Amino acid sequence: MAIHIKRLHNLISSSTSIFNPIYRKSYIHVSHVSLPEKLISCFTSRYDFSACSAGLTGQIVSDAYSPRLEDAVERDHHEFLKWHKGGGMFHKSASIDPTALIDFGAVVHSGSLVGGNVHVGSGAVVGPNVAIGQWTKIGYNVSLANCTIGDSCIIHHGVSIGQDGFGFFVDEESTMVKKPQALKAHIGNNVEIGANSCIDRGSWRDTMIGDHSKIDNLVQIGHNVVIGKCCMLCGQVGIAGSVTIGDYVTLGGRVGVRDHVTIVSKVRLAAASCVTKDINKPGDYGGFPAVPIHEWRRQVANRCRTSK
């Protein structure tokens, strides 16, 4: 092993032909801009992420140092400026309140609105035409696209809001086809969303989270979901598409809700329950499938007795 490592070291040391194309066409040499800002400009175009990410990646790999790409990067760089408070980047067409703090490494794209006293953490990406209300805090590495965020919200690290929902169908040729995901996600006022949670944008209606609702870490909310005010979603809750949830609903940890289900207001679900049909009466529920809590307890007791 040591002999092979020594041979590899001698090969790299004796020849720089592999790296010559990079040295000749390096971004550091074509512009006075530093490498981090150049890379930010390269990957923060005005276009919608879901529409161009795959094609753009292929173009960068196959045409990495062409003059055309260098011109595009240079043009995009001039459209992004450095924010005076925090050092983040923003597009010329974005509307940002002077009191907003945009940390270094954060990017605000074209047409976005950022309200007063908003804090956008490092690594966060505010996509095109996103609106953020005043006094809202956006954590590190948050991704916002196709959405609006209300006032006084807390979006913790790693949250993704407004990406495409999981919608596919099989056509006449037995090919898996993606359903259009063209609408938005709306987050109300005083909403808190835990780390690494995901909220998809809508396809036939907007995804909506009501005022004062609280969402724990690692929660998945599918497209077209409507959640009322003052709801609590504990860790690892999964809500499928087109679910409607009323006000003051509490979902315990790892609760699952199937698609197109309606849950009325003032319902509480025990941890690890699964909702497979509509819940039309307020109260406590549990089990798989979820039933009224007293019935679920009887089921558990009977199962324990018969297993002995």
Image: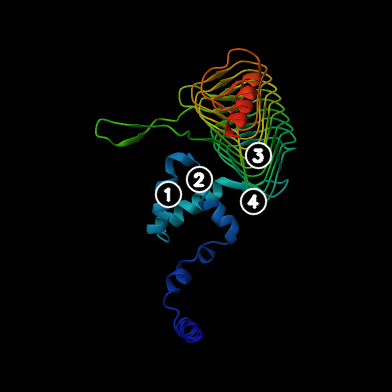
- Taking the spot 69% from the left edge, 20% from the top edge, the residue there is 248
Q: CA distance from mark 1 to mark 4?
A: 21 Å
Three-letter code for the amino acid on which mark 3 is drawn = Asn
Q: CA distance from mark 2 to mark 1?
A: 10 Å
Q: Nearer the viewer, mark 2 or mark 1?
A: 1
- Distance between mark 3 and mark 1 Cα atoms: 31 Å
Q: Are marks 2 and 1 in contact (CB under 8 Å)?
A: yes
Near mark 1 (Cα within 10 A), the count class, few <14, some 14-19 or many ≥20, is few
Label 1 residue SS: helix
Identify the residue under disc 3: 217
Note whether 34 is above or below 265 in the view shown. below
**Image spot of residue 238 (x, y percent):** 56, 33
Place of residue 287 in the rendered image (x, y in percent of width and height, measured from the top left): 59, 27
- The image shows residue 124 at horizontal and vertical percentages of 62, 45
From the image, tell me which residue sits under label 4.
105
Residue 214: horizontal and vertical position, in percent? 69, 30
Q: Residue at x 51, y 23 (%)?
A: 276
Residue 269 placement: quadrant: top right
The kind of residue tagged 2 is: Ser
Three-letter code, disc 4: Gly
Q: Which mark is residue 56?
A: 1
Q: Which residue is mark 2?
A: 45
